[in-house]
Image (spheres, rainbow, N blue to C red):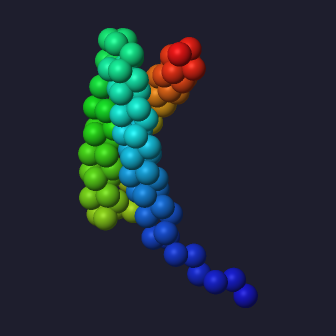
Amino acid sequence: MTSPRDPGLQPERTLLAWSRTALVLAADALLVLRTGYVRRLPGLAALGGLLALAAVGLYAHGVRRRSAVEHSPHAPAGRWWMRGLAVVVVLAAGGSAWSVLVNAGG
């Protein structure tokens, strides 16, 4: 006998994923920003600032999604948010790699 599926769990896990992603992006942004500031690399510092703004925007989007999902559990996230998030993740990875390479160089 199969148990009934609870449709409320998946939207909740997805909303938590938005919050976790924003938190990790904020931590990465602070590390990249710090490296840019300490090593006097304005490009890296600017990337860190951009990533910090993106983390705030992502968190705000997560809060808005939580409100939308409360009204309709199957509300779509939106394609442009997902594409934007993909671009931000690539920028964060590049900034992190740049930061590690700068710190490894001395």
In which quarter of the view is residue 31 placed? top left
Residue 34 seen from this side:
yes
Residue 35 placement (x, y as % from top left): 40, 23
- The residue at 36%/27% (across/down) is 34
- Furthest residue in direction front, as rendered: 106
Instruction: Say which quadrant the N terminus sits in.
Output: bottom right
Compared with 66, 53 (above or below) is above
- Furthest residue in direction bottom, as rendered: 1
In which quarter of the view is residue 83 placed? top left
In which quarter of the view is residue 46 placed? top left
Judge by depth and name the residue closer to the eye, 59 or 49.
49
- The residue at 32%/20% (across/down) is 37
Residue 23 placement (x, y as % from top left): 39, 46
Compared with 10, 91 (above or below) is above
Compared with 50, 82 (above or below) is below
Residue 90 horizontal side relative to residue 26, left or right: right
Compared with 44, 49 (above or below) is below
- The residue at 41%/56% (across/down) is 15
Residue 6 placement (x, y as % from top left): 52, 75
- Furthest residue in direction right, as rendered: 1
Residue 48 seen from this side:
no
- The residue at 28%/39% (across/down) is 56
Judge by depth and name the residue closer to the eye, 46 or 39.
39
Residue 60 placement (x, y as % from top left): 26, 45
Residue 70 horizontal side relative to residue 89, left or right: left
Q: For the image shown, how many numbered marks are present on the structure? A: 0
